[in-house]
Amino acid sequence: MHLTLYIITGLLYVTGFSLLFRRLNHKQGKPVADKWLISAFALKVMAGIAYGYLYAHVFEVSDSWAYFEESLIECHKLLTQPSVFFSTGLHFNNAGDLFSTADDAPWSNAGENLLIKLLAIFNVFSGGNYYINVIFFNALSFWGLYCLYVIAQKHAPKNRLLLFGLIFFLPSCLFWNSGIDKDGLIVFFTGILIYAVHYCITVKPTAGKVAVGVIGFMFIFLLRNVNALILLPAIAAWWIAVKYPVKPYLPFLIIYSFGILFFFLSGHLSPALNLPFKLAEKQHQFLALQANTVLPLTPLEPTVKSYAAILPQAANHVFLRPYITEIKSPFHLMAFVEILLILLVLILAAVSAGKQMVPRLAQPFYLFLVMIALSGLLLIGYTVPFPGAIVRYKAIYIVCLLIPFVSLLRPKGGKYIN
């Protein structure tokens, strides 16, 4: 019975996606063949199913299955007591503290509540089946990657297949962002936000696109507020770099300089806005957790000296770990191979672009991607001491970091195009 349900659901999705891909590809100038998109979606669903199976039968702890179990309770509320369903999980304690880490603060558990409510709605149509929910869930996260791909290939159309492979098939992004977790939703809303901002910058702002961008940002903030905040300076600098006749790197340099200054002075504006303290508090929460593998990470203090001292550790954890001597599981091996892949792409981009590398990277869209990637990666490095969590959190940032460098790889014919 379950197998029949999987097949019917899969066929319906493939048919629906095929028709939708045809329409979208026609509007976007056919950036990639329909069969490649359908294949990418199918592989993403299979990765999500594998993720669920492994965390059901191999690993002991799984947020994904915990969210699903809670969603079954919420689904019953939705069908029998809708008012209770929509009111459960709403907390207003510490509501004025946007960065509160208290368990009863609305901003600290909003992401989990949002995901559980969404799964509860999926359960109505899936009959409470985890693996069918995987299909529904990936129908969202897939579109975030698709939006990112559509924009990226506009900047390097001759490298569109390489970009397609990077965005949809990078192992860490494919596996970790296909499982039922907050990261897949963050990918979805980040993709539509970037798409909306790109349209407003390069074409014209419209009420619809602005609304999509605002909604995307709001949901990212609810899911993981720091992911939303690091987008703000990057978007502002990207906008200014395109709209005003200045060197593209200047807006990024100026805005990020003021951003770093604001970060460390924020505590003087309001105790609730003490960002160095809030980030240190988040790191201390991670350090208090237990895991099989823990990387050495010095506890943060809310001072410039402490952040500067721990910067090498943070960079090392996200860019170089695990070392080959630290490989203890297939996931560690996948992370290690991916680090080698990143280094290979960087080297090939440098060799391929030569003297053109710096000026070609100094394009507003590429600078935007690099800055949100570096901000996100360092944020993870500062706060997370667990290799498994690091590789999951950083997956989408690695994609953003590599897009500009993959675009630099010399296309067939030996010439770049603008």
Image (tube, rainbow, N blue to C red):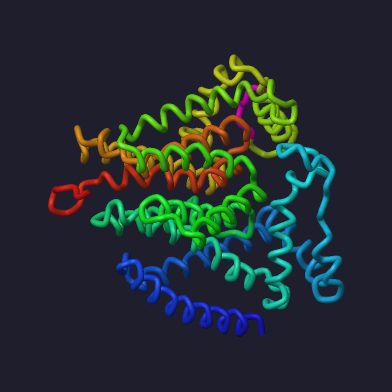
Please give left or right for residue 224 compared with residue 196 in the image.
Answer: right
Q: Which residues are magenta?
A: 294-299
Residue 298 in magenta stretch: yes
Residue at image point 61% right, 43% down? 389
Residue 323 visible: no
Residue at image point 43% right, 80% down? 19
Relative to 383, say whether 328 is above or below: below
Q: Position of residue 279 (x, y in %)?
A: 66, 30
Q: Position of residue 70 (x, y in %)?
A: 78, 61
Q: Nearer the viewer, residue 124 or 9?
A: 124
Kindly indicate the quadrant of the structure image that contains residue 6: bottom right
Relative to 217, say whether 67 is above or below: below
Seen from this angle, which residue lies furthest left? 413
Kindly indicate the quadrant of the structure image that contains residue 278: top right
Please give left or right for residue 185 compared with residue 18 in the image.
Answer: right
How many numbered circles does the render carry? 0
Residue at image point 75% right, 32% down? 288
Residue at image point 72% right, 76% down? 124
Residue 363 in magenta stretch: no
Q: Nearer the viewer, residue 254 or 179?
A: 254
Relative to 326, say whether 208 is above or below: below
Please give left or right for residue 246 compared with residue 217 in the image.
Answer: left
Residue 417 visible: yes
Quadrant the N terminus occupies: bottom right
Q: Position of residue 233 (x, y in %)?
A: 50, 37
Main SS category, magenta section? loop
Q: Position of residue 13 (x, y in %)?
A: 52, 78
Q: Nearer the viewer, residue 407 or 4?
A: 407
